[in-house]
Amino acid sequence: MMEPSERPILSLVEDALRDLRNRTLAKLDGDLARLVYLASTRDYNTGRYAHDGLSFRFSESVTETVLAAAHREAFASLALSPLRVLVSQLEHYIRSGWAHPDELVEAWNSSEAYRILPPAADDPLTVRLFVSNVKIALAIVKAAWQEPQALQDPRSASQLPSPGR
């Protein structure tokens, strides 16, 4: 049997990607949560990706390649999805772990933290589309909290409870 260092790089990348999907990404609840996680593996000063678990099993080079590829894939999936899908993913992300969802919406609106989610070298038009759609999705979610009748309408774009409830 070949040592890991002797295996073809493509095979190592495929194994590492499978490992990332099965051990890490599968545990995250929703596409937006996966995108946020993958963006967080990138050092914002250098643009390099790091993941201790993958680096332990694979080389840093393979780890960086896999994280960058998974990040691009997760971003493209959300950036090119219909707005209703992004709204649904944002709602799901907020509901899945934020004690004060209104604070997250306000923080994202004021700091525009979502701007760090796209991969660094992605298509500028796709990045602008994503940023624009996130702004709209945030406005839809916020409006749903301010309009109690929107919560009662099953056709509403948002099913989030209002912050006061």
Image (cartoon, helix red, strand yellow):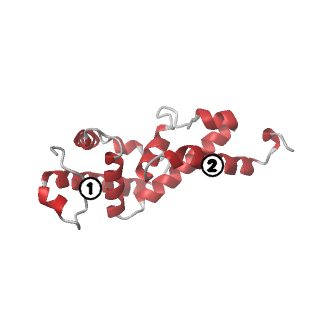
Question: Which residue is depicted at the point 32% across and 63% down?
Answer: 84
Residue 105 versus residue 46: which sits nearer the camera?
105
Reply above or below: 16 against 76. above
- Image quarter of residue 2: top right
Q: Which residue is mark 1?
A: 136
Q: Is residue 48 left or right of residue 132?
A: right
Reply above or below: 39 against 141. above
Residues under labels 2 and 1: Cα distance? 32 Å
- Closer to the chain start, of discs 2 and 1, is 2
Residue 95 position within the rendered picture, expressed as x and y whole percent measured from the top left: 31, 47
Residue 163 position within the rendered picture, expressed as x and y whole percent measured from the top left: 18, 44
Q: Residues within 10 Å of mark 1 (few under 14, many from 20)?
A: some
What amino acid type should be assigned to the residue bearing mark 2?
A: Leu
Question: Which residue is depicted at the point 13% across and 56% down?
Answer: 147
Q: Residues within 10 Å of mark 2 (few under 14, many from 20)?
A: many
**Closer to us: mark 2 or mark 1?**
2
Q: Is residue 98 left or right of residue 64?
A: left
Q: Is residue 64 left or right of residue 101?
A: right
Residue 5 position within the rendered picture, expressed as x and y whole percent measured from the top left: 79, 39
Q: Which residue is mark 2?
A: 17
Check if mark 2's residue and mark 1's residue have beta carbons within 8 Å.
no
Which quarter shows the N terminus? top right
